[in-house]
Amino acid sequence: MPELARCIVCEGGEASPFALVDQKSLSRCARCGLIFAHPLPAAKATEAFYEADYYDPYLEAERTNAGCYEAWLDAIEKRTARGELLDVGCGIGQFLEAARARGWRVEGVEPSPWPAAFARETRQLPVRTATLESAAFLANRFDVVTLWSTVEHLPDPLAVLREATRVLRPGGSLWLAVPNTRSLAVKLQGLREANLAKPEHLFHFSADNLTRLLCGRVGLEAVERIYLWGDRTGFVSNAVRHLARRTRLTTEIRMVGRKPATTAGDS
């Protein structure tokens, strides 16, 4: 008999086959609704997703993305004084470049060789070609750790989120953004919705089960969903975002949580 899929959020073994999307088998947890690829693709298969041409859209969208990154930084700086910032899965480094320009001391990790090299050589950023775990940063080092559009790609999100929390200083904040399985686009398009269909997206969250993961299994506190208003793209675009905020049907879920100021074992 095939091994039962175990949920990383609620640890239930009650996930059942949900859908087959372009040869990606998805299971859905009966308890918390997490949707995830099962079985996970082999490492060599996932590496093939991230060849250099994968990042062409990011290069083409740099001007558009710049306003979003400034809005993210505005939100971060309302809660945290500028200090040490680590971006996990930093890609071509545009967010890190924006943070550095505002006075943050930045580092990044990116396991795909081409974007990591682009960030180092074109933007002169301190980016390691590594996973977060293999980078082996010292504990309690960073004021902020970000994972923008990263968690859904990870074969083991729980391990990476726990490592991100380990390298945060006590009281530091972890920020992340993932696609929303309860967005208007998913309701209208179903399995044809782009984020569900992408072969490289392995985990698919709702706001509820993501909050449960961050609080219950990662150990963060003060977890809240963040809505960005005024990302400098114009009134109509921002009005649409505001409407999506009111209905909670946004395409993306953005969240922040804090590492406890003290933990068990602290003196």
Image (cartoon, rainbow, N blue to C red):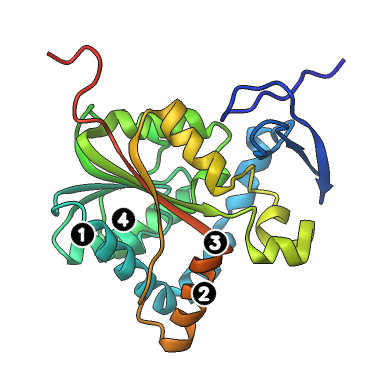
Q: Position of residue 43 (x, y in %)?
A: 63, 34
Q: Relative to 16, does residue 146 appear above or below in the rendering? A: below
**Precedes in sequence: disc 3 or disc 4:** 4
**Picture quarter with the N terminus:** top right
Which of the two discs, 1 and 3, labels the residue nearer the N terminus? Answer: 1
Between circles 4 and 1, the one closer to the viewer is 1
User: How many numbered markers are drawn?
Assistant: 4
Of circles 2 and 1, the one toward us is 2
Q: Are marks 4 and 2 in contact (CB under 8 Å)?
A: no
Residue 134: in sight, yes or no?
Answer: no
Residue 178 or 99: which is nearer the viewer? 178
Q: Is residue 264 above or below residue 87?
A: above
Say whether disc 3 or disc 2 marks the residue closer to the N-terminus: 2
Residue sitting at x 78%, y 18%: 3
Residue highlighted by disc 2: 243
Tag 2, which secondary structure? helix
Measure the C-alpha gap from mark 4 to mark 2: 39 Å
- Nearer to me, 169 or 92: 169
> For the residues marked 4 and 1, what is the alpha-carbon distance in whole angstroms?
29 Å
Mark 3, residue position? 248
Name the residue type under label 1: Lys
Amino acid, disc 2? Leu
Kindly identify which residue carries mark 1: 78
The residue labelled by disc 4 is: 120
